[in-house]
Amino acid sequence: MGLFHRSLYQPFAYNHMMKKPILLLTLALACSQLPASAQFGALKNKLSNLTGGGGAGKKTGSFQTVWEAKFVNKASRLAVSNETGSLILGTDDNSATVLDADGKPVWNGDYKKLTTNNTNTSEFQYIIRSKSGGYLFLFDSRKFSTDRLAVLDLATGKELWNSEEYQNLLNKEQEAADIETVRYIDELDAFLIAQKGGLTMVKASDGKKVWHTDTFKGSVGKYIYNKASNQILMVNYKPTALAALFSGFKNQLVKINALNGQILWNTEFRGTIEKKLITREPVIDLTLVGDKLFLWLDGLQAYDVNNGKKLWDVAYENDMSKSSSGLSGRGRKGIYGTLADPIYTDDAVYFPVLGSGNKSKYVEKHDLNSGKLLWISEKITGAFSMPHLYMTGGKIMVQIGGKVQVQEITTRRTADGSETDYKIYTDYVNQKNSLLALDANSGQTAWRSEKFDKRITDMIIHENKTVFAGDGDEFYAYDIASGKQLFDVKHDDAKVGKATDVVDFGDNVVVISEKGLASYKKADGSRNYATAKLSDIDFFYNVGGNFFLRSQKGSKNIIYGVDMSNGNIKGSVTSKGKGGSPAYGNGIDITDDGEYIFAFKGKKVEKIKVNN
């Protein structure tokens, strides 16, 4: 069987009742080049000087503005570029404007005039980005009439196709923050549309129906595509808002022929798919290892990829979602990313499990073929979260503590009645933050570091010999084999605030901190530089080899460009505008090569060059 590739597609949803956009922070935290993805907009009624560590000040610069231009309409819904920045889109509920790479108008118009089926107020619209252009998908959900769907060519504004065949894609009784019934398959340039009668594959370019099956019903939660065999492995779930339409629904894993929709096998799976509180991402994963398909849902389930037969099943809680333990605030709250993904080898799988309480955790090793428990670690005390596991040097390195993602909905009374806030942020939970090394063969504890500060960064593994990590005030290196502490650097001396992330940068480790960054040599921990007096840095991005820091202070959204080799700040962009990519926040988008930033504010858009 050929190699399957996990899709890079992920939906991004906007909710205009929020003071900040909904973000898929997993992309921000992945610290890798962002994939080409769909950008969504959902209709809502509302919606310096630098001083360096080590005694040296760091240079600050300013980005060069290439041009500033205006949209014909006001970009209040979508304001993004395609992959290369050759086309820039601004939309409101009823119209769109597209500019070219020079800021010149390409096309604009009202949806009602651009479409032949009079698609107008689009409750849901999103852009499929590509190098040459892309698609603008419009869905007009009409409460007392037939729903309308239209797809426009981003490069020309011409309608590629429209349809009134696909109904009930959104819940008409509630304002939709996402759409669960349409999934774009990047590898096939096609849409999968789920309806009561089954699943239909439609070509994105012309709307032609490729196939329809009534065996597979419900939304596509995850999929893996095999280009060699043109087959898709899919897992589906019942759309939350439209559950009544999907009577007789059953949770299914399906292997399907992408050419004609033939179901090669289907099997029911155990568990209930939860979705994140605000972004509504299904908390589920699919992984293919050889001829085995692993479903990460309420534990780990293994299936034979050739016939769908379940091979083994280990039930455990995958995450601490919808828990408020250790975090302040009121209202509904979900906590995500608390337990690491499994580690797969040729003959075994390792994963963390919950014990009898939130702070009782273990790591288990199971045989890959049979699921047999090979060993279980001793109780890992004082651990609320264990977000990362690594196999290195014959050890399983366990990160105890670290950032978790919080999605929170709070409602407060105002003079006009009430107002609801939607927040997505990262937080730390006070626990026995530390590094733990387990012997991969026996599960015995090889060593455990002393307790870190109230926080701990992710680990960086170097040549399977050394592990680096930081806490709020210090930066550490340990020998993986023995657990010996190689050095302990006073990071607070860098005067860049408490550490939040670490970046593996050649012979150095760059520590991203709340007020800047500091770079340390892997060899001895000596500081290369420190860049301070930034403000509330909360995320960083590596986009095409260009590094960016992000700050969200008050209503501002600031993106800094940084040269990781010397700490120099290339420039910064501050935006209070709407739109932009959800990965970068309100009013900001960045081309996939990281060379250009677009800043949006209403009708205005500014193109900014990153490297002068």
Image (spheres, grey):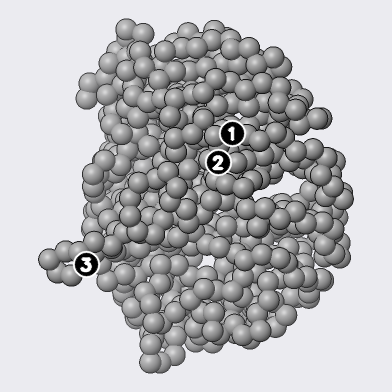
Q: CA distance from mark 3 to mark 1?
A: 42 Å
Q: Residue 539, image x and y in percent?
A: 41, 38
Q: Depth-wise, is mark 3 or mark 2 nearer the camera? A: 2
Residue 231 lies left or right of residue 195; in this view the side is right
Q: Residue 176, image x and y in percent?
A: 40, 72
How crowded pointer 2 is (Cα within 10 Å; few <14, some 14-19, many 20+) is rated as some
Report if the CB atoms under discs 2 and 1 are less than 8 Å apart: yes
| Three-letter residue code for mark 2 | Lys
Q: CA distance from mark 2 to mark 1?
A: 7 Å
| Furthest residue toward front | 356
| Marker disc for residue 418 | 3
Above or below — where is 269 with respect to 262? Answer: above
| Marker disc for residue 83 | none
Residue at horizontal 36 percent and vertical 17 percent from the top: 492
Residue in front for this viewpoint, 88 or 404: 404
The residue labelled by disc 2 is: 359
Residue 123 location, quadrant: bottom left
| Three-letter residue code for mark 1 | Thr
Residue 141 location, quadrant: bottom left
- Asked whether the viewer can see residue 609, the reply is no
Residue 352 lies left or right of residue 174; in this view the side is right
The residue labelled by disc 1 is: 381
Residue at horizontal 48 percent and vertical 76 percent from the top: 241
Q: If you read the primary sequence from the N terminus, does the residue marked by circle 2 or circle 1 appear first?
A: 2
